[in-house]
């Protein structure tokens, strides 16, 4: 059973999405990921976007660790319902609606946000399903780029056998790390960055 690792809701068990349609981030990978983000000062008082949220595990972990706001974007009806339940667990601990859920396709959500021209995020998680093609992922990254704050970090989680994403001109690779069958890529707005070369180590 997945759980919130640390923070105000640390230890809280999370509701899982039934079936095998989603691929939850393991607690080992999650602990390593958030340890890195903490060292980069990318958790406290930040605005978080969790795309292809699944159960919302990464987003609610951020909320537990002090994120200012978290949006979970998930199209699958069952998974979106699980996101809502996990959001409520953390919101209750935080004493307000820190985490919100958007049931939407990722491309549609980012398109609507672009038209509104308002939202900017500091930390973005992307853990797309395996069947998502590289061109589809590239399109999402392209849509995302203009909606990031200057010192944002984007974390893309994929199979270790998947090639590095094709970054749009608005993003550049900051670091990458392999954990067993999982690989994480960290990207930042081109020419910016929260930690520069210090964050790029393995």
Image: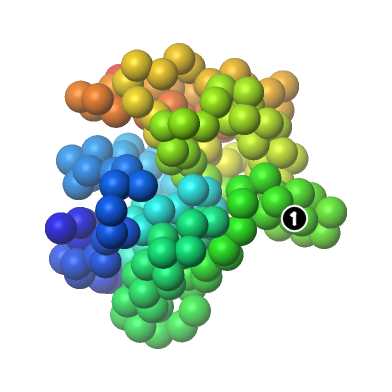
Measured along the vertical axis of the image, is residue 172 above or below residue 76?
A: above
Q: Is residue 102 left or right of residue 42?
A: right
Q: Is residue 32 left or right of residue 45?
A: left
- Residue 17: image quadrant is bottom left
Q: How many marks?
A: 1
Residue 45 pos. (x, y %)? 49, 61
Q: Residue at x 28, y 53 (%)?
A: 19
How busy is the neighbourhood of tag 1: few (under 14 within 10 Å), some, or many (20 plus)?
A: some
Q: Residue at x 51, y 32 (%)?
A: 132
Q: Residue at x 20, y 56 (%)?
A: 2
Residue linked to disc 1: 113
Can residue 44 be seen in this snapshot? no
Q: Residue at x 27, y 70 (%)?
A: 8
Q: How is the image coloured?
A: rainbow
Residue 183 pos. (x, y %)? 34, 25
- Residue 150: image quadrant is top right
Measured along the vertical axis of the image, is residue 56 above or below residue 100?
A: above
- In terms of depth relative to the viewer, which is nearer, 60 or 109? 109
Determine the secondary structure under disc 1.
Answer: helix
- Residue 89: image quadrant is bottom left
Residue 4 pos. (x, y %)? 24, 61
Q: Quadrant of the C terminus?
A: top left
């Amino acid at each position: 059973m997945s759980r919130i690792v640390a923070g105000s809701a640390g230890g809280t068990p999370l509701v899982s999405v039934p079936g095998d349609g989603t691929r939850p981030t393991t607690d080992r990978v999650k602990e390593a990921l958030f340890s890195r983000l903490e060292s980069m000062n990318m958790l406290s008082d930040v605005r978080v976007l969790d795309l292809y949220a699944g159960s919302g595990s990464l987003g609610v972990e951020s909320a537990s660790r002090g994120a200012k706001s978290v949006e979970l974007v998930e199209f699958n009806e069952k998974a979106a319902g699980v996101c809502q339940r996990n959001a409520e667990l953390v919101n209750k601990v935080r004493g307000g609606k820190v985490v919100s859920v958007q049931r939407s396709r990722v491309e549609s959500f980012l398109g609507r946000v672009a038209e509104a021209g308002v939202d900017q995020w500091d930390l973005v998680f992307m853990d797309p399903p395996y069947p998502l093609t590289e061109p589809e992922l590239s399109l999402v990254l392209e849509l995302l780029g203009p909606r990031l704050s200057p010192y944002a970090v984007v974390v893309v989680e994929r199979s270790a056998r998947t090639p590095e994403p094709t970054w749009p001109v608005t993003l550049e690779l900051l670091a990458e790390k392999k954990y067993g069958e999982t690989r994480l890529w960290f990207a930042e707005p081109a020419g910016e960055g929260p930690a520069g070369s210090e964050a790029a180590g393995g």
